[in-house]
Structures are given as C-alpha cells and as structure tokens.
Amino acid sequence: MSIELKLSRSNRIYRPNEPIAGKIITKFPSSISHQGIRLTATGTVNLQVRGGTAGVIESLYGVVKPVTIVTKSVEVRSSGKLSSGTTEIPFSVILRQQGHDGSEIFYETFHGANISIQYLVTADVMRGYLHKSLSATLEFIIESENANLLQAPVCPEMVSFYITQDTQRHPLLPELVSGFRVIGKIPTQCSLLDPINGELTVESSAIPINSIDIHLLRLESILVGEKIVTETSLVQTTQIADGDVCRGMTLPIYVILPRLLTCPAIFAGPFSVEFQISIVISFQSELSKLHPKADPRTPRLWLAMETLPLRLFRTKTAARIWPCTFYGAVMGRPSVMSALHHNFLLAGK
C-alpha cells in the first residue's frame, strides 16, 4: 500500500504563474474507501539562529517563526473508492492566479545554512477516523517569472584586484614579509545561468604557493527581536591551481554556480541573503600540515585572501562564453578542467 507524487516536469522547475501539474500514483493490493483526496501546495521561508553565531539571548529563540509565502489547497477527488493495483490521478494547482495585485512575493528556492526557502506539494488520501490517512510530499523548485527577468544576457561587471602583504588584515608568515603580489580580474555581478569567469596572475612570491582556491560564500541575515544576526558560510570551493605556479602566467578563473545553494540576492524585512566571492592563496608551510582541516575562511599565517561582494541575478538566457585554458590539478574538487566541457556546450547553443 503506497502513494507517490510525480510532477509533469522532470526538473521540477516552475514559475509562480504556471500550473503545478502531475499525477498522484496509488498502489493498493485491494480496493479501499476514502473520504476525499486533497492536494496542498505550500511555500515557506524557514529561519534558524545557531547558538555559535548569535548571542545568548538570540540563541534562546532557536528556530524563528517561519514566513509563509503561499498555501493553496484543492480537492482532487471527492469521497469514493480506489481500486486495487496502480491508479493514476491527475492534478493541477496554480500558485498565483492571473490578474493578481502583486501582494504575493515568491522568492526563489534556496537551501542555505540558516535560511531555507522551500516549496512542497502534498497529497492526502483521507480515510476517516478509523484508518490512518495516506500522504506523500514532494519538493518543487520555483524560479522568477519570465516577465520579471532581464531580456538579454548582462555582461558581468569586472573589477580588478590585487593581493599583497599590505592588503592583509591578519599576520602572515615571516618569510612573506619580504613581499608577494597577485593581481587579477573577477566579476562582482553575475547571472545564475552563467559561470563566474575571471583571471589571476602571480607576479611575485617569496615562498612557493601550495594552492589557489575560489570560495563562494553566502551571507544570511535574520532579524531576531531588534537585532540582526548575520552568518557567513562556505557554499563551495573551486581550485584553480594546485602547487606552485609560474610567475607572470595568467590563470583562468571558472566557477559554476550550484543550483539550489544560490539564488538572486534577497533583501526582505525579516531576512536577507547575499553572496561573496573570496580568492584564497595558500603558501607552502609546515604549519599548514598541522591544520589540514582548518576552516578556509579563518585567517591563518600561511593564507592570503581577498573577499569581494557578488550580486547574483537571473536572466532569460545564458551568455555565450568561449572555452578557457586549463591549469592545475583537480584534487577531487571542481576545477577549470571540469568546466571546460560545459563551456563548449554553452558556446554551441
């Protein structure tokens, strides 16, 4: 005896003004009676304050009251019987009706550390007081409506950066006091459909480099009482160089944005979601071997870093990007090598 949900789209991506359609599939060894079959679509923003990032008073709140985005319920079938074997019951529910006044705000699906924006569809087969109701729940993904998206791809806003011993706010290894200099370019705004493209050059360094990594960071802020609690967490790491690199050689930066772990920047009343990109250079040192699992966001003697804001937004189409050059080993993490084939596919669209 089972019940499951199957949506009409395999990728489960919908927009607020599109019908959420699919089938309720039931499998029973014998026919059963029911008091009705109801389908409910919900959207909520779940907020959580972690004790390690908030004060004592804020941590007492724990889970903040969720923000309800939408709740829609429809009766798929009135009371009756479901036959034995497999039965498929079609359904369709519209989250936002035509001619809406715009008061409903649909945020894109996002899975963060403290903030989670989730949309669920639940089917309930009600069987009365003497029998337990049967239910199935499935998550679907909401993206911004086409009418609110930019018509054409937007060129990334490139900014130049440089990393030296003078730009660091934490102490470095004594060997690095004699100097090092890393320059490059990277965008501070990017479409969610495009990769982050940039370049980096190591002009000089007193000691060999161990690795160069690009960290994608998220900043989640939650209003708790009269105080805003903000936490920065790591989304993903992309290694662009493993081991020492040739001085003066231009290295490409190519970062593919993860699907559910990123979203357009959100600035709502009780919460906000922003992103940053951090260039981290790790120098060869015996001290680094003593802390192999250290948090990459924590300043260390053997690390030099530069963090820049990153504004993410969604467009209707992706930009046509030509393939870049690969440099460095992968070491089990995403790198330019894994992005090379994807880049060819984008150029061929």
Image (cartoon, grey):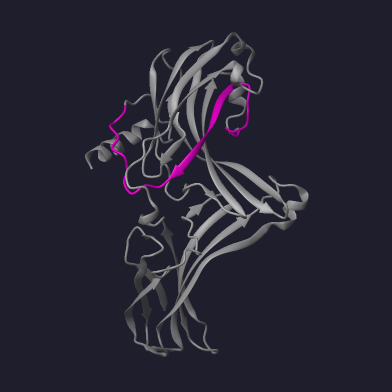
Specify whether 264 is left or right of 273.
Answer: left
Q: Position of residue 341 (x, y in %)?
A: 28, 36
Comparing 308 with 337, the one in front is 308
**Residue in view at x 66 percent, y 59 percent:** 64
Query: Which range is magenta?
Result: 295-324
147 relative to 289, above or below:
below
One can see residue 19 in this view: yes
Give the residue at the far top of this rendering.
178
Instruction: Give the residue at the far right of this rendering.
Output: 56
Along the viewing direction, whichever of 57 and 143 lies nearer the viewer: 143
In the rendered image, residue 299 lying in the magenta stretch gets the answer yes
Classify 304 as above or below 156: above
| Relative image position of residue 85 (x, y in whole percent) | 32, 81
Rendered residue at 28%/32% (across/down):
322
Q: In this rendering, is residue 328 above or below 222?
A: above
- The quadrant of the rendering that contains the N terminus is bottom left
Q: Quadrant of residue 168?
A: top right
Residue 230 lies in magenta, yes or no?
no
Q: Residue at position x 63%, y 44% from top?
A: 231
> In which quadrant is the C terminus drawn?
top left
Residue 114 is at least partly visible in this image: no
Q: Nearer the viewer, residue 136 or 58?
A: 58
Would you identify the image quadrant in which residue 68 lies? bottom right
**Residue lying at 51% horizontally and 89% vertically, measured from the top left:** 128
Count of numbered badges drawn on the protein? 0
Picture coordinates of residue 165, whole percent (x, y): 59, 16
Image vertical order of residue 135 relative to residue 294, above or below: below
Residue 153: percent from the left, percent from the top? 33, 42
Magenta segment, prevailing SS (helix, strand or loop): loop
